[in-house]
Every structure is written in structure tokens, then in C-alpha cells.
Amino acid sequence: MRSTRRSEAYAGLVAIGLFALTVVTIGWFMPDAPTGPRYMGAGAETPQRGGTFVFHHESDVRGFDPHKSFDELSNMGIKLLFEGLLDYDRDTMDLVPRLALEVPEASEDGRTYRFRLREGVRFADDPCFEGGRGREVTAHDVRWSMEHMLATGTASPGATFYTLIEGYDAFRAGEASHVSGIRVIDRHTIDFSLSRPDQTFLYTMAMSFAYPVAREAYARYGEEIRRHPVGTGAYVLEDWEPGVELTFVRNPNYFEEGRPWVDRQVFELNLDRGPAVMRFRNGDLDHIHRQTPSDYLELRDMEAWAPYRVEAPQPNIWGVIMNCDLAPFDDRHVRRAVAFAINRAQWRRARANRLALQGQPIPRVLPGFDPELPGRHEYDLERAREEMRLAGHPDGIEQEIEVWLGEGDTGRRYGELIQSDLREIGLNIRIKQVAFPIFLQETGKPRTAQMLLSGWSMDFPDPANFLDILFHSRSIHEEDSENKAFYSNPELDRILDEARVERDRPRRLAMYREASRILVDDAPWAFVWSDVSMEMWQPYVRNYRPHAVWDNFYRDVWLDLPRRRVAMRPTSPLNRFAAALSPFGRLR
């Protein structure tokens, strides 16, 4: 056996050597990467039907259960597979109807909303239905979906958005078989009644947690529902090759006649930023939204790409999160020391100035941002060391502290920045990098991760979406906690609860600014930055515009090319590498 293995190893080395020679030879004759688009549009003035749109993501997908999956990548797929009662206008943050006929007005007391549904909307065809044919969506489906999402057994991270629906507590406690505030009026009409006015309620009804789902699918697939989505969206999931590729194809049951325009959408998974940029410049990817710092600087200066790119601050926040239930971060002085020790300007330089420094929990683009707060935690080593002294650790802490980060070069670079900054105050940091689905799963459990680097992107354009979700004690669960600092402060909870129902807008925003000051002073997060994003698309990609709420939303795109090149399917790291290098492809 030993000699056989040695022969196999030798043969493998020869094969690798030949492949390396081939790559070098190809690289020798390859032209430099193009300084502008390789493929232009054909000049069509009206939307063209057909083609395949190809996108990429650095991570793997968690799943497509709207009630449980809410990370960026999963939600991008969910938006293709499902529709909600409400959505956002493509050009603004105004709500518009989708499965509902109109955006409902609140009753006179501000507590009841009546939704009237479109007739004839059907679920996608699936074996879970009798005869495999998708049936009509009714108000009963809306109620079942909401109650399934709110049930404690579902453990949905979205349940906390809907606590003000009448009967929420009794239903969650098992004291009622239905949520009393959700009432079916007829087959296409449903009322939602709240215990108090909620200024965010209609926004929450545009979130994926409120999307109607098919009870037959949950009955058939059980825990595997995340791999078998059955919705009302423009696409259905054709194939999911874990860690490699997702393929979505047109849903023939889609309620908008003639839509979507594109036949197929392909998401390449676990593709790092550098290779993704190479594939984009070769014309093999249709859109990119993240680049390495060097690629960003190069692409930003290429005038030929100017009409096909946009750069803008994002409605998100990023920071170093400290678990307030675990030592040493159960001491606010240690947390404050970390906040003062983070050299934000150095982080910004490391990201090619693509960061908008963020010293508070509300992004600059949202109402409620406090212009007086950003300087409260400026880099100040002396104050950081004083906080360590107040915590009883003037010489630092000998025990190693583990920081959780995502995979890849970017995650490692951030880990090194954290190590460097916190070494100055005597904290010894060990980097732990894990795959994104594992990161989400494990950091949402109590007493698991001491420290992590993470962020939050806006779900709806209101301060409550950041403060309530990330810092209210009701966002703490045994699993899927969005309050990953496990921070609990009764005074903060009180302010947030009052702000949520306050109908006077100036007073409401003042309450959120007060809450922000509490969080900056208590420092469950060391708030570091908001992203500045540069998105680029090929000239033949039409009808795509970045949206402040839905980061990457491709339902409405169309392709202005009768024929497009396709790179080899990147079904393995080897093929991906070759696809990134090769200037050749196939036509489709």
C-alpha cells in the first residue's frame, strides 16, 4: 500500500506540475486585464426577455426559510423566491403594495390595519401540493404564516418585530391557538390589530418574516424547508450545490404577467473578492459590490467604467461586539477601554478610505443620527488605559480572549487590526475564523463568543431597526439572538419601548438619540464604521439600481445582449482558478 500511495503521490505531483506549466503558459500570452467593459449592450430601448444573470458572494448560503434565514445572502435569494404584502419603491424608501392591493392606512386610533390581497396569486408548483400544482394564496395563508413565524417552536429571529400585535404574548405562551390580533375577514381580506400604535409596523410587514408561505411545504419538508422554498416570487430554486453555486429559474406562476425578464439567475458562492473582480472584468460576472482595496482603487480610477458604477455610504453599522455575559466584558470599564483603543483612522486606511467612521448605533443616513456623538469614542490610548485601571486591570489581562471573524483575507486582516489595537491596553487576542453560516449560528447563542466583529444592515428605514434589534433585551434568545452582545439594560428597554409607539416624530427621534448616548457610554459595541460601497455592473445589465433597504435586488433586471459569453462552470476551486485566468469562454 505504501508504494502505491507513493506512486499516486508522484503522479499527482506530475499533474500539478503540468497544470502549473499550462497556467504559466496561458498567463504568458494573456493580455492585461481590460481597462474597460469587454461587452456593451446591443442598444435595445425596451426590456428584452431571456438570458442568465450571474452574481457572486464570498460566503455560503444559510437557507431559504423566510421565517428563520435573514443573513444578507439568504435574503437575496428569498427576495427572488417570495413576495410580501408590501415592498419598497425601487427609487425611494416609500412602501408600495405587492401581494396587497394597496398600502393600508391605520385606523383612527392607530392600532388596526386592513390588508386586501390580490386575487389569483399562486404559490409555485411543488410536489407538496395535490397534483404538484401551486394553489391560490389567501388571507388564511397570511394568518398561518404569521402564526408559524411567531410560534416559540419556530424560534424565528423575526418574532420580536411583532410583539405589539394583540394576543402576541398569549399565543407565545401557549394560552391561545391563534393570535387574536390577526383576523381573517374573508378569503382576500385580513386585519392586524395592535395593542398600541407602532410606527414601524408597516415596515415590518415588508420584511421577509411576514412573507406568506405554504403550510403544505412545511408539512412535507419539515426541517429541510430551508432547501425546499415554496413561494410566490419571480423565481424558483432549481439547484443548490452547497458552497459552490445557486441557480434560480423563472417561476411560470408569477403574478406579474411577462415577468421576470431574465430566465435564470446564478449566484457563485465562496468566491473571494480578488478572483471575483477578475471574472467581472473578463465579462463572466454581471455585477460586483465588493472589491479588495487595491481593486477598488484601480476600478474607481477607470473612466470607462464610470457610467456603470455608483459609490455611496451604506445604511449599516460595523463594530467590535463584546459579550456582556462573559468575562472580561461583563465589566463596562473593559468594554469602554476597547472602544477607546480602536484606532478607527488606521482601519479606514486599511480599507482604502472606504469606511465612513461611525461612533454610534444609528447610521448617518437615517433620521435620529446624533451629530454630537461620533467623537465620544475617538481613539485615545490614555483614556483606554484609565478604563482598564478602573476595571482593576492596570497591567492588562493575561488570559487569552477569542475574537470570532468570518473567513477569508478580509476577516483575517480585521482580526490583525483588533490584535494590534488591543495589545496596547494589555489584551491578548486570539483570532477564530469560521464559515459564515457557523458564525451566525454560534454567535447567536448565549455565553459562546467572547468578542466578535460583525455588523447590521438596515431592514427598514427607522432607528428602531438598529436599536431595538441589536440592543433590546427581548432580542436575546437561546438561539439566533440578534443582540449578540447579550446586553440587557432596563432603562434602555423602557426608552425603546416608549419610542416605538410615540406618534410625535421630533419627540420620538429625541428618544432615540438618548438611547444612542446610553449605548455609547455603556459600550456593548465599539462602533467603528459604516460601509462606503462601490457597485459595478456590465453595460448590458439594465434596470438595476442599488437600493438603500434591499442591498442587492435583481428581480427586475434585464440583459441587453442577444448573446453573452459564459465562463466554464466554477464547480471546483481548480475550475474557478482557471476561469479567473482564462480569457476564453462559451456563448449562450
Image (cartoon, helix red, strand yellow):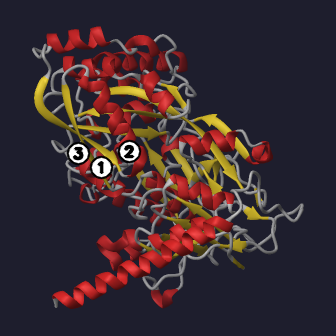
Three-letter code, disc 1: Gln
Whether residue 285 sits left or right of residue 491 in the image: it is right
* Image vertical order of residue 71 relative to residue 340, above or below: below
Q: How many marks?
A: 3
* Image vertical order of residue 292 relative to residue 426, above or below: below
Whether residue 140 sits left or right of residue 478 in the image: it is right
- SS state under label 2: helix
Residue labelled with disc 1: 433
State which quarter of the image contains the N terminus: bottom left
Point out residue 65 in the picture as x, y percentages from the top left corner: 40, 63
Point out residue 251 in the picture as x, y percentages from the top left corner: 61, 75
Sequence order check: which comes first, mark 3 or mark 1?
1
Estimate the spatial distance between the alpha carbons at disc 2 and disc 3, rounded to whole Å. Answer: 26 Å
Three-letter code, disc 3: His
Q: Are marks 1 and 2 in contact (CB under 8 Å)?
A: yes
Residue labelled with disc 2: 411
Three-letter code, disc 2: Gly
- SS state under label 3: loop
Sequence order check: which comes first, mark 2 or mark 3?
2
Question: Marks 3 and 1: which is nearer the front?
Answer: 1
* Image vertical order of residue 203 relative to residue 578, above or below: above
Is 245 or 215 nearer to us in this picture? 245
